Image: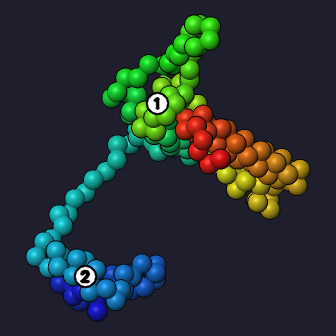
Amino acid sequence: MAPRSDSATGGAAAAAAAQAHGSDFDSIDPLFHVLRVLPFSFLRPPRTRLRLPSNLALPSPMTVFALILLTYFSVVSGLVYDVIVEPPGIGSVQDPATGAVRPVVFLPGRVNGQYIIEGLSSGIMFLLGGIGIILLDLAVDRNRPRSLRVSFGGSGVAAIVIAYAMAMLFLRIKIPGYLW
């Protein structure tokens, strides 16, 4: 049952618009109905007339895509961890046979710790896999020439395979003996 409106014409117009757009929230869940109707039985939303400034333009889709991709890379590479914990860029280990100190990129044995370069390289591999999925999505577009679709498909598959292989290699370096 739809919620009752104050005015008969407004309620009919809203119901007709909801039916036309297919956004009617009919649900058999009574809790959903209570949460959707109850607050508006005693609360009225204010009538605000907000306008965007005339000199403000929406960003282009590629700008939004680039920002989302950058955010994704920052999250999966552990940038928040790197800022909070401030680990070293790379580590070092002393070779027991020669006594020489050699650099180590992966922090072995600790799943909840990382060096900065380790996080960035893992983030690049995850980003490469995501770009491969995007390329595969572009490859199924029938409006593109066949040679371009084949190029997108081959590049997408190659990117996903490389990202998977490198991520598994990183995991095996990080946790020796895992999945063997």
123 sits left or right of 111 in the view:
right
130 sits left or right of 18 in the view:
right
Measured as percent of width and height from the top left, residue 6 is found at 17, 84
Residue 52 drawn above or below residue 92: below
Q: Secondary structure at mark 2?
A: helix
- Badge 1: residue crowd in 10 Å (few <14, some 14–19, many ≥20): many
- First in sequence, mark 2 or 1: give its number: 2
Q: Can you see residue 141?
A: yes
Identify which residue is drawn at 22% across, 77% down.
35
- Identify which amino acid the numbered label 1 is placed on: Gln
Identify which residue is drawn at 40% across, 23% down.
87
Measured as percent of width and height from the top left, residue 71 is found at 47, 39
Q: Check the picture and name the quadrant holding the N terminus.
A: bottom left
Q: Which mark is residue 167?
A: none
Task: State the count of labels.
Answer: 2
Q: CA distance from mark 2 to mark 1?
A: 44 Å
Comparing 140 with 161, the one in front is: 161
Residue 132 drawn above or below residue 169: below
Where is mark 1, residue-wise?
114
- Identify which amino acid the numbered label 2 is placed on: Leu
Measured as percent of width and height from the top left, residue 150 is found at 85, 51
Comparing 22 with 17, the one in front is: 22
- Badge 2: residue crowd in 10 Å (few <14, some 14–19, many ≥20): few
